[in-house]
């Protein structure tokens, strides 16, 4: 059975920040490193939850991240992490099906 991925559902916006001072660049790099670290930590937690994931575990992960970032960033990170895990799971399932193995 072939696996068909859905087409793009949003709009990607690319831009470059111009006229940044060296201090601005330093702050942006530090913020990016911090948020990337939080996202990595959350992905590890989401993977550990596996199929036992629930709205309660999601809320707990968001609360933990909110202590280290804003609630808005925590929500964005947990949503992206969940979507990333789900995409990997669908890809894994499609690969297993392509091998003709049903488990």
Image: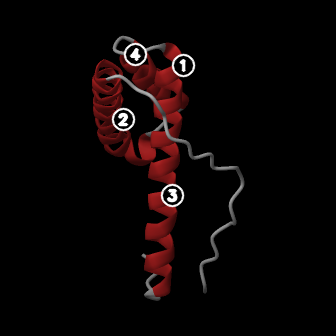
> Disc 4 designates what residue?
69
In which quadrant is the N terminus drawn? bottom right
x and y percentages locating residue 8 in the rendered image = 68, 60
Mark sitting earlier along the chain (3/4) = 4
Q: Is residue 81 above or below residue 59?
A: below
Please give the name of the residue rendered at 63% of the width and 49% of the height, measured from the top-left corner: 12
x and y percentages locating residue 22 in the rendered image = 29, 24
In which quadrant is the C terminus drawn? bottom left
State the CA–CA distance, disc 1 to disc 3.
23 Å
> Disc 3 designates what residue?
87
The label number, if any, that marks residue 62 in the structure image: none
Mark sitting earlier along the chain (2/3) = 2
Mark sitting earlier along the chain (1/3) = 1
State the CA–CA distance, disc 4 to disc 1.
8 Å
Depth check, front residue: 39 or 85: 39
Please give the name of the residue rendered at 55% of the width and 42% of the height, measured from the top-left corner: 15
Q: Residues within 10 Å of mark 1 (few under 14, many from 20)?
A: few
Left or right of residue 21, residue 16 in this image: right
Q: Residues within 10 Å of mark 3 (few under 14, many from 20)?
A: few
Q: Residues within 10 Å of mark 4 (few under 14, many from 20)?
A: some
């Amino acid at each position: 059975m072939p696996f068909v991925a859905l087409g793009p559902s949003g709009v990607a916006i690319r831009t470059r920040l111009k006229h940044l001072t060296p201090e601005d660049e330093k702050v942006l790099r530090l913020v990016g490193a911090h948020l990337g670290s939080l996202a990595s930590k959350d992905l590890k937690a989401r993977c550990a939850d596996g199929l036992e994931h629930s709205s309660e575990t999601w809320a707990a992960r968001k609360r933990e991240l909110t202590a280290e970032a804003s609630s808005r960033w925590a929500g964005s990170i947990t949503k992206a992490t969940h979507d990333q895990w789900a995409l990997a799971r669908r890809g894994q399932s499609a690969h297993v099906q392509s091998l003709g193995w049903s488990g």
